Image: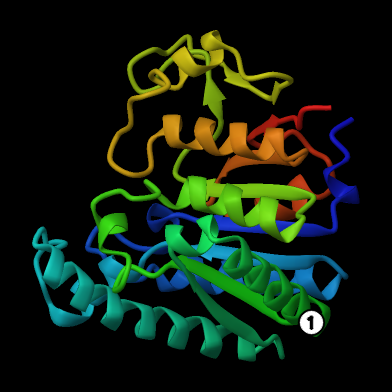
């Protein structure tokens, strides 16, 4: 039994591939469905905290840039534009369901600072208790090192947020259905693994190795997030965000994605 239905405080990480088209602009149809389902889960009594990617891509799209910029100063500027746009969209969409959202921007320096970390915990707790959905992202405009992979990516950030906020479950939505025994794109015999009791070297190898990653959202970064979550006593699920309605199946304890169990 997965017991996902019993989880109350949930950190949901939304990857760029879930939120945006390949053009970098928002996938409005999918975001509309996501916001509706997340609002419904929130209305059912669950405490939701989101970690959202997409700011740099959105900023680039709003400026009409053909691709994400490579120069750090341009990335900073584009991130500032994108954060504004991203929160405007979330605020507007969630308001339709009478759900209030708030923005929290983090840097590694904040996470590594004990007093600042405590401030994050206190603010997050207050927002959640008021029925607000905090939306967390790295402060890409200030955290220059992050743009050059300071924390690395939002998978690991979401695991740290789950740990700091005392979450019961970390849910990572991506373009990946589950952890497979091999690469399903090249191996037709690859099978999905529904439950991982412990992250072993064999599991890491299935993700392409502990130190490898395809961009900032490869499976290996999700395995790293699972390690952080497991050590903190938090279950983690990876599932495809293509069909937001599948979230209902997940919270009815149906076999969706891959469940990484917390260390006991």
The residue that mark 1 highlights is 131
Instruction: Left or right? Give the position of 167 relative to 34.
Output: right
* Residue 255, image x, y percentages: 74, 33
Instruction: Left or right? Give the position of 3 relative to 39.
Output: right
Snapshot colouring: rainbow
Residue nearest the viewer, comparing 127 with 120: 120
Number of numbered discs overlaid on the protein picture: 1
> In percent of the image, x 62 and y 19: which residue is there?
199
Q: Secondary structure at mark 1?
A: loop
Please say if 208 is above or below 25: above
* Residue 132, image x, y percentages: 72, 82
> In percent of the image, x 53 and y 51: which residue is there?
241
> In percent of the image, x 78 and y 38: which residue is there?
233
- Label 1 crowd bin: few (<14), some (14–19), many (20+), radius 10 Å: some
Please say if 136 is above or below 3: below
Residue nearest the viewer, comparing 240 with 74: 74
> In percent of the image, x 50 and y 36: which residue is there?
222
Please say if 108 is above or below 79: above
* Residue 158, image x, y percentages: 56, 53
* Residue 185, image x, y percentages: 35, 23
């Amino acid at each position: 039994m997965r017991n996902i239905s019993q989880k109350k405080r949930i950190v949901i990480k939304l990857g760029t591939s879930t939120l945006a088209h390949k053009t970098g602009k928002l996938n409005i149809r999918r975001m509309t469905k996501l916001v509706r389902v997340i609002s419904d889960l929130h209305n059912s009594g669950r405490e939701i905290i989101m970690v959202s990617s997409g700011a740099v891509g959105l900023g680039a799209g709003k400026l009409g840039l053909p691709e994400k910029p490579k120069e750090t100063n341009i990335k900073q500027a584009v991130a500032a534009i994108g954060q504004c746009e991203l929160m405007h969209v979330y605020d507007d969409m969630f308001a339709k369901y009478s759900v209030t959202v708030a923005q929290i921007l983090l840097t590694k320096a904040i996470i590594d600072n004990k007093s600042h970390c405590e401030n994050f915990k206190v603010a997050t707790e207050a927002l959640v208790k008021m029925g607000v959905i905090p939306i967390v992202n790295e402060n890409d405009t200030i955290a220059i090192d992050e743009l050059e992979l300071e924390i690395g990516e939002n998978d690991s950030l979401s695991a740290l947020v789950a740990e700091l906020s005392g979450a019961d479950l970390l849910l990572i939505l991506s373009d990946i259905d589950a952890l497979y025994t091999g690469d399903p794109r090249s191996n037709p015999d690859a099978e999905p693994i529904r439950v991982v009791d412990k992250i072993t070297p064999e599991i890491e190898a299935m993700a392409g190795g502990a130190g490898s990653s395809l961009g900032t959202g490869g499976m290996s970064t999700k395995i790293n997030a699972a390690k952080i979550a497991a050590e903190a006593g938090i279950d983690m699920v990876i599932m495809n965000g293509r069909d937001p309605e599948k979230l209902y199946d997940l919270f009815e304890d149906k076999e969706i994605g891959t469940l990484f169990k917390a260390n006991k």
